């Protein structure tokens, strides 16, 4: 190497700071491992196509069942309104009746789910909600208030329905709660079908012990039936059995 080349090299390396490559100890090196569940993966891989199709078909039947019952319930309600055999109680009328002489309470109830449409005798459901102000802002009260779930008739004259035709409590489950804000009625069950009553439906009312403070909430048009339409009945009606037999022959 010539003197000029050495001078250029030294100039280019001027200010260069030497460094070393860090090599962590072997004990600190973590090698990622692939974790699998062979039982689940093998089950998914080896599951016959016919079984998967049957599962999807069962899900379809469940959704179809819900839709059929909901449509039937809507028809029942519309038929009742059209016949005018009994005068139905509006939500406003029922609340005014229950709250008199208290009006314009500072708080009300809001719910995050609705009653089943339809409900079924002896089959439980759950209601969740909160106490809110008039602007729908959730509030926490200074003192707890007790709430009750009560069944009212849907027609005039307004009255509570406490017992079934067999002197059994018409509503069972967690029907009374005490809370500062959260509303949680767990496993409510209606023990009487609504078709035995003139309006063919009920009103489910959530009442506060202090109705001067919290306005009641009305779940109207509660239709209660005997039993759900079984999937096997739907299969028979829509001739799914032949399709099931076809799936059973698939490999």
Image (spheres, rainbow, N blue to C red):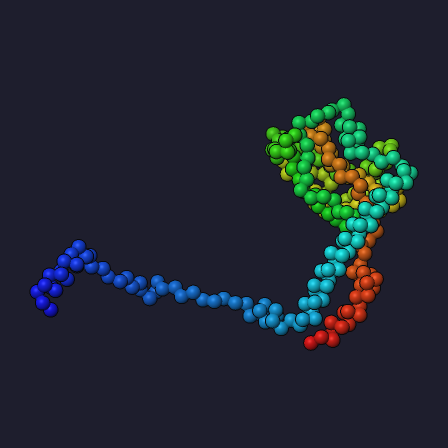
- Check the image and report above or below for 222 versus 180: below
Residue at left offset 79%, top offset 43%? 222
Residue 105, percent from left and from top: 69, 27
Residue 52, percent from left and from top: 68, 67
Indicate left or right for 13 with 48 as reference.
Answer: left
Indicate left or right for 144 with 155 as reference.
Answer: left
Q: Quadrant of the N terminus?
A: bottom left
Q: Examine the image and state in which quarter residue 91 appears.
A: top right
Choose between 107 and 240: the one closer to the eye.
240
Indicate left or right for 122 with 13 as reference.
Answer: right
Residue at left offset 67%, top offset 42%? 112
Residue 181 makes an appearance in the image:
yes
Residue at left offset 76%, top offset 57%? 64
Residue 189, percent from left and from top: 77, 46
Q: Examine the image and state in which quarter residue 98 appears.
A: top right
Which residue of the protein is positioned furthest toward the top in this rendering? 101
Choose between 193 and 71: the one closer to the eye.
71
Choose between 11 and 199: the one closer to the eye.
11
Which residue of the protein is positioned furthest toward the left in this rendering? 3
Residue 241, percent from left and from top: 80, 68
Q: Examine the image and state in which quarter residue 15 appears.
A: bottom left
Please tell me how many numbered marks the rendered image carries.
0
- Check the image and report above or below for 74 versus 56: above
Residue 183 makes an appearance in the image:
no
Q: Quadrant of the C terminus?
A: bottom right
């Amino acid at each position: 190497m010539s003197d000029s080349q050495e001078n250029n090299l030294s100039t280019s390396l001027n200010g260069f700071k030497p460094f070393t490559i860090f090599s962590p100890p072997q004990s600190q090196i973590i090698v990622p491992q692939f974790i699998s569940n062979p039982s689940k993966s093998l089950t998914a891989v080896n599951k016959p196509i016919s079984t998967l199709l049957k599962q999807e078909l069962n899900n379809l039947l469940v959704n179809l069942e819900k839709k059929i019952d909901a449509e039937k319930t809507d028809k029942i309600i519309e038929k009742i309104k059209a016949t005018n055999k009994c005068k139905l109680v509006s939500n406003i009328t029922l609340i005014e009746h229950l709250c008199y002489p208290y009006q314009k309470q500072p708080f009300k109830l809001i719910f995050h789910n609705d009653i089943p449409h339809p409900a079924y005798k002896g089959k439980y459901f759950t209601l969740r909600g909160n106490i809110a102000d008039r602007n729908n802002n959730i509030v926490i009260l200074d003192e707890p208030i007790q709430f009750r779930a009560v069944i009212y008739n849907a027609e005039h004259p307004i009255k509570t329905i406490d017992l079934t035709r067999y002197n059994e409590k018409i509503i069972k489950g967690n029907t009374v709660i005490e809370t500062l804000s959260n509303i949680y009625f767990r496993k409510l069950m209606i023990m009487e079908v609504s078709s035995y009553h003139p309006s063919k439906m009920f009103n489910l009312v959530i009442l506060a012990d202090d109705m001067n403070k919290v306005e009641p909430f009305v779940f109207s048009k509660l239709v209660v039936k005997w039993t759900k339409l079984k999937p096997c009945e739907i299969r028979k009606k829509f001739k799914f059995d032949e399709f099931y037999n076809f799936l059973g022959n698939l490999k």
